[in-house]
Image (tube, grey):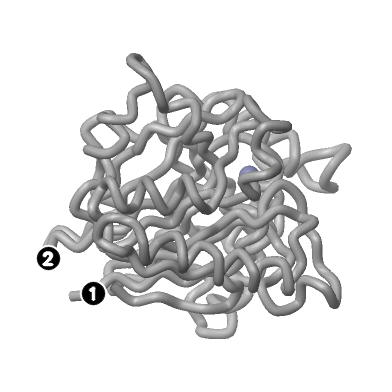
Amino acid sequence: MSLTLRFWRVRGSVAAPGAATARYGGNTSCVEVAHAGGALVLDAGTGLRPFGEARRAAGELAGPIDVLVTHAHADHLLGLPFLGTLDVAGAAVTVHAAPHVLEAVRAASHSLASPPLFPVPLAQRAAAPTFVALPAEGATLSGLRVRAVPALHPGGAAGFRVEDPATGRAAVYLPDNELAAFEGECGGRRELLEAIAGAEVLVHDATYLPAELPHHRGWGHSTYAEAVRLAADAGVPRLVLFHHHPERDDAALDRVAAVAQGVARAARGAPEVTVAVEGTALTV
Ligand SMILES: [Zn+2]
């Protein structure tokens, strides 16, 4: 069986809606891995609200939801208080994070979803979420095998590899990751490549243009060119550029797509590159 990724929302750092970003979308990270086994969501950015509303429209709002959160920054958590399922008594919402970021994710979630930032304390919602550490060996969530993938980002982060156990088809999600920091003797690039190898698709941070990167060392993000090289080196046939800079409008993202596709054609294995567009789905 195939895996379907639904890109509920694809922007990075802060929501940037408006006419100039209407095509690619202005709301922040939330990707659903659609699967018959249940609802698995990657990150709880502002895209989590429309994900929940779609479940309400489908009559599935009360169903269990597993939310995998990469890290505690606000653009990955602001949708959580607006997930309609939290107001359905008896529903189960579980937030999973890698052990080294779990406490930060839990604290930030309670802060963002409680007074004074939100009117009702998160713990008092009818289906208050539980927070669970993803074991090092991975876990089966909503019928899919999930394990953490190394990421380098200020404050700590992890990506996720999601695999259909029946077919072995896998997707890797790394929305906030500074690939330049993986270079060098102790950079850990080999471990990163091993974690990605064999996947059908890589969804990766492409926040910066190459010309912008020198001014943003240590900010925790990558360029489309670095993402293409990672996909090529790992032998992943499809790359989706993700976590768009809030100031990158639709015309600029069209240019990124064209340039990145040119870079990819010249790379080993010539991975197929697309730029994530909100509201679209990809089946692999
Ligand atoms: Zn982010």
Q: Which mark is residue 101?
A: none
User: Contact (CB < 8 A) between labels 1 and 2?
Assistant: yes
The quadrant of the picture showing ligand 1 is top right
Residue 69, relative to residue 255: is it above or below? above
Across and down, in percent, residue 78 comes to 71, 49
Q: Which residue is mark 1?
A: 2
Q: Secondary structure at mark 2?
A: loop
Q: Amino acid at mark 2?
A: Thr
Residue located farthest toward the left when viewing the structure as drawn: 166
Disc 2 residue crowd, few under 14, some 14–19, many 20+, Cα 10 Å: few
Instruction: Give the amino acid type for the residue marked by disc 1 in the picture.
Output: Ser
The location of residue 249, given as percent across then percent down, is 77, 67
Q: Residue at x 48, y 70 (%)?
A: 274
Q: Does residue 187 appear left or right of residue 78 in this picture?
A: left
Question: In the image, is residue 133 above or below residue 270?
Answer: above
Q: Compare marks 1 and 2 and give the one earlier in the sequence.
A: 1
Residue 233 shows in this picture: yes
Kindly indicate the quadrant of the structure image that contains residue 30.
Answer: bottom right
Compare residues 245 and 39 and report the one nearer the observer.
245
**Which disc, if any, is residue 167?**
2
At x 45%, y 77%, the residue is 281
The image position of residue 128, as x and y in percent, is: 58, 47
